Image (tube, helix red, strand yellow):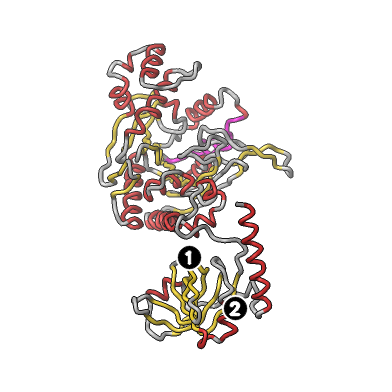
Amino acid sequence: MEQETSDVRAQRLENLKRLEEAGYPPFGPAFERTGLLADIRKQFEADKSVRAAGRIVGLRDMGKSIFAHIQDGSDKYQIYLKKNQVGEEAFDAFSILDLGDHVGVEGTLFLTRTEEQTIKVSDWTLLSKALLPLPDKWDGLQDVEARYRQRYLDLIANEDSFRVFKLRSAIVREMRRFLDGEDYLEVETPMIHSIAGGAAATPFETHYNTLNMDVYFRIAPELYLKRLLVGGFDRVYEINRNFRNEGLSRWHNPEFTALEIYEAYGDRSTMQRLIEDLIKHLATTVMGTLQVGFDDTPVDLSEWRSVNYDDLIADTAGADYASLDLAAKRERAEELGCKLAPEWGEVEVTQEIFEKVIEKTLINPTFVTRLPAPLVPLAKPCDDDPTRVDVFELIIGGREIAPGYSELNDPIIQRERLVAQAAGDSSQVDEDFLLALEHGMPPAGGMGVGIDRLVMLLTGAESIRDVILFPQMKPR
């Protein structure tokens, strides 16, 4: 394969030299276009003069005429060259071109006998010479790892991949439009933190040379966004990257995109209404349907329900589960197929049942509410039971898409929770955040949305790597 690639490259270098000698520099200037190829197709008029540019993805030399297809980011379009119209030198030079080369063409529009829109070329310019071949036009890029490592080839070869990433942009764009329309203010907060806070996760660490201090890439923007509620902003959101030094899987990438939203004077119910409206809006506006998901787990976004965490556990692990001691709960969990660490207590054992057994069965949108307080240290306790917090986890397609809270704004309880989360290490407690809370944060609803997972859901992508342009990969 390496020898074959080397031979092709050598031949293309020879073609490059021939084109230069014919007066066609291999890496040309900018080229002014009438519009994208999709625009030209939409505004077609016979005999209309146009200027277009794109990559050659199809080529048929018929002796005294050449048919080719060029492709830009919007469409693919046929072009036609005739020797007696472009001139012998220009025609012969065009015949030296290879698939993958970029050209600019000038000409007029017409329809072929098969009614295909085509540009009759009167002049052309070489814009960029490709020294390596494109993936096979019929087989595409079959090597899955190559698709992720060389995403540019994946985008050229796989129409579905190209479609997914255009949809991703449309989803994020429409998300912003929706939130702006609801009077949420988009903000930016730091991505380098002196203390890794806002979630329970392992951070990436680095060193700030100028200040001679260790810092962390953020695991969540939560604590900074809440400072803005203290400062008087009523509704804020941020779309940006989070970083967690943890595993790689179908659902996990260490660098991921998240939306976080906070609303002063709101609560968990406020966030439930918002996320349902937002996801339905994205599905209907961008995808054109409320029936989405993966082939094996279709999702109906018109059906939403709420269910208590403890009720789900009882339905799966037995009605008597809550009354069992730790040893019996561990035994019950193992009977359900869970693998437990020796040091885990009741909360961790129960959460393992939820994550490994229950979660994957929740296909249509399900708000799982009233979680155990130790799982969510930044949420408000339920009024009727301080061992439970007023939160939801939104599960769709068997995976968490968004957690939402009634935010804890009591600085005294918050300090206790953060110290407990840090296992008593006060140096890992964000004192500046607690200082902000002591100036008075209004009651609020807050929510985080995993944008990569949401795009997976809406487009039916099988892996998070299929919706991240350049996912993290092991070295070759």
Q: Amino acid at mark 2?
A: Ala
Total residue callouts: 2
Name the secondary structure under disc 2: helix
Q: Residue furthest left?
A: 303
Q: Nearer the viewer, residue 244 or 211?
A: 244
At 65% from the left and 57% from the top, the residue drawn is 6
Distance from the alpha carbon under mark 2 to that under mark 1 = 26 Å
What residue lies at 25% left-to-right and 43% top-to-bottom? Answer: 303
Q: Residues within 10 Å of mark 1 (few under 14, many from 20)?
A: some
Of tags 2 and 1, the one toward the viewer is 2
Q: Which mark is residue 73?
A: 1
Nearer to us in this view, 324 or 418: 324
Tell me residue 32's x, y (percent).
Answer: 54, 78
Q: Nearer the viewer, residue 349 or 226?
A: 349
Residue 436 higher or lower than 428, as above or below: below
Tell me which amino acid carries mark 1.
Gly
Q: Which residue is mark 2?
A: 93
Predominant secondary structure, magenta span: helix
Marking on residue 179: none
Quadrant of the rendered image containing residue 363: top left
* Local SS, label 1: loop
Residue 46 against residue 420 in the figure, above or below: below
The span shown in magenta is 428-442
In the depicted structure, whether residue 37 falls above or below residue 311:
below
Question: Toward which corner of the image does residue 384 lie, by quadrant?
Answer: top left
Residue 453 percent location from the top left of the image = 43, 44
Q: Earlier in the sequence, mark 2 or mark 1?
A: 1
* Residue 437: in magenta span: yes
Q: Is residue 367 visible to us here?
A: yes
Place of residue 82 in the rendered image (x, y in percent of width and height, measured from the top left)? 49, 83
Residue 471, above or below 177: above
